[in-house]
Image (tube, grey):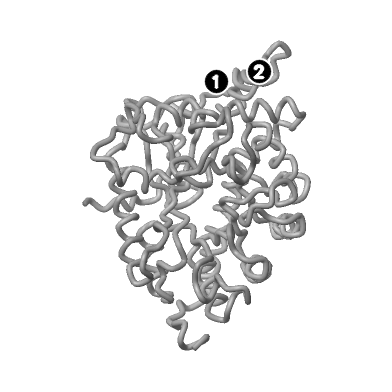
Amino acid sequence: MADLHDEPHTLPEVGELDDEAQAAPFGPYAPLTAEEAAEAVQAAHEPESTPLERARALLAMHPVADGYSGLPSALRHLPCYDLQLGESAVDTDVPRLRRGNVGALLWSLHLPEGLVADRAVGATLEQLDLARSVIAAHPEGLRLARSAGQIIDARNCGRVAVVLGPATAAALDDSLGILRVLHSLGLRVLTLTGTSWAGGEAGLTRFGEEVVREMNRLGVLADLSGACDLTVGRVLTLSKTPVLCTRSAARALRPHPANLSDELLAGLGEARGLCLVPLTAEQTGPGLRDVADHLDHVRAMAGPACVGLSGLYDSGAAHPQGLADASGYPHLIAELLRRGWPETDIALLTWGNVQRVLRTADFTARAAQDRRVPSTVRIAELDG
């Protein structure tokens, strides 16, 4: 397989895109000219516009950055597929991403349940290889992104940006060296659960703290969905970069184990982290309005700068009515507009907050690499 590690792209000027980009079917989140941007703003403020029309106009300017997609695992079981033309066997394909105004996706590399621990590294590498192969096979619709700047670059070229992660912490095999290798292959998010150093009731161990410091140095974001409260609290205190909860809603509205208490939501807001509310019936409820209720609650507890969206499409989860696949986001945004959400908060919800977290991680990593030597410790040296 060809190496897909792109060099950092410079943002093209409008009208000066490369031939490949000009030939691609851009879809609704293509780079906007000044006239198109003005028309989108006017449409969003048209007094006679319906909430759905306003939602589509807003999403043309601020597309959705979806915090969790299980597409790589879903594609593994298909003998053939074509995401560019459309694929009915999955919840996500390029046409539905365009209808849903999705501009970026975090692709989960989580492992199947029951996988033997010593297979975790190899299975994660296989997931990475599959994800990169899918992106390479759909160059007109998808582009691998390793930073916030490359996400903007992909959007300006009419592609959906794909960020690799979250992956399972067991994939490190208790080795910081493996963390660095996974990062070099494109990994940008790691879920801190399911290990002796991050998954127990005692919270984060000394080795777990060293993992978080090395993640900060590399620019790998910590995903705390499903972590115990002690681990969440310690990582919020220790991490120099904002943390993610890629699949967490409000525990006060629905007592799911992965949902967050009001206390943790407030702490996440103080730490400038990001709670990505999942669109699943189990965690948020059976209807679109139930999802909107969770978004209202998380925004109230953590602040508008700390709430985002995770579709969890192709993850095996059941979805609320009206949000069956990746094309449903405009209907959710229309419901928030009916509830009086300001357009500035919606722009943060869909696009701005994910961009902020990724940019902060990039900046912190550049600063830390000048100060901190890569660590070589293993778990036995600290927690043994």
**What residue sits 33% from the left and 33% below the top?**
83
- Residue 245: where, in percent of width, then height? 60, 55
Left or right of residue 126: residue 67: right
Q: In the drawing, what numbered circle is on residue 289? A: none
Q: Residue at x 75, y 29 (%)?
A: 339
Q: Indicate the quadrant where residue 109 lies.
A: bottom left
Mark 2 or 1 closer to N-term?
A: 1
With respect to residue 379, does 326 lie above or below?
above
* Amino acid type, label 1: Glu
Q: Of helix, strand and loop, which one carries label 1?
A: helix
**Residue 36: numbered disc:** 1
Rendered location of residue 196, percent (x, y): 51, 76
Rendered residue at 33%/53% (across/down):
5
Asked if residue 227 is positioned above or below residue 173 in the image, the reply reads: above
User: Is 165 on the left or on the right of 303, as rendered?
Assistant: left
In the image, residue 148 lies at what x, y percent? 51, 48
Numbered mark located on residue 42 in the image? 2
Q: Type of residue at label 2?
A: Gln
